[in-house]
Amino acid sequence: VPQHTLSFIKACVDARTYPDLFIYPGHKHNVAGKDRIHLYEKITRYLEEELEF
């Protein structure tokens, strides 16, 4: 796990916040293929739940 991710998680724990975090291994910056479909489905579900569609 990249150091920045570990720092982010530590900051969230320190601040008592609960991020919705999902890591896609094998992708450095751009999520592609089946993982991209999963990402957009996850974003859609999140928006539906938070905006109560």
Image (tube, rainbow, N blue to C red):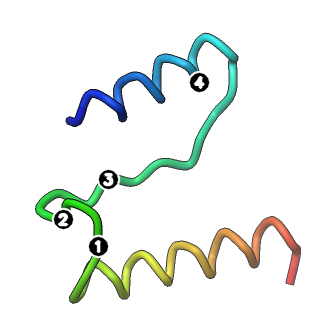
Eyeballing the image, is 41 above or below 1?
below
Q: How far apart, in angstroms, are the residues tagged by discs 3 and 4? A: 16 Å
Q: Is residue 29 rendered to the left or right of residue 22?
A: left
Q: Secondary structure beneath disc 2?
A: loop
Position of 37 with respect to 12 (left or right) is left
x%, y% of residue 39? 42, 75
Q: Which residue is mark 1?
A: 30
In the rendered image, the quadrant that contains the N terminus is top left
Which numbered disc flags the more N-terminal residue, 1 or 4?
Answer: 4
Q: Secondary structure at mark 3?
A: loop
Disc 4 packing (10 Å; few <14; some 14–19; many ≥20): few
Query: In the drawing, does residue 52 fall left or right of residue 22?
Result: right
Q: Which residue is mark 4?
A: 12
Residue kind at label 1, given as amino acid type: Asn
Above or below 19: residue 25: below
- Do the numbered discs 2 and 3 sit on residues whose CB atoms are within 8 Å? no
Disc 2 marks which residue? 27
How far is the residue under mark 1 from the one under mark 4?
24 Å
Q: Are marks 1 and 4 in contact (CB under 8 Å)?
A: no
Distance (Cα) linking label 2 and label 4: 23 Å
Q: Could you give the CA–CA distance between mark 1 and mark 3, rounded to whole angstroms?
A: 12 Å
Q: Position of residue 19 (x, y in %)?
A: 59, 40
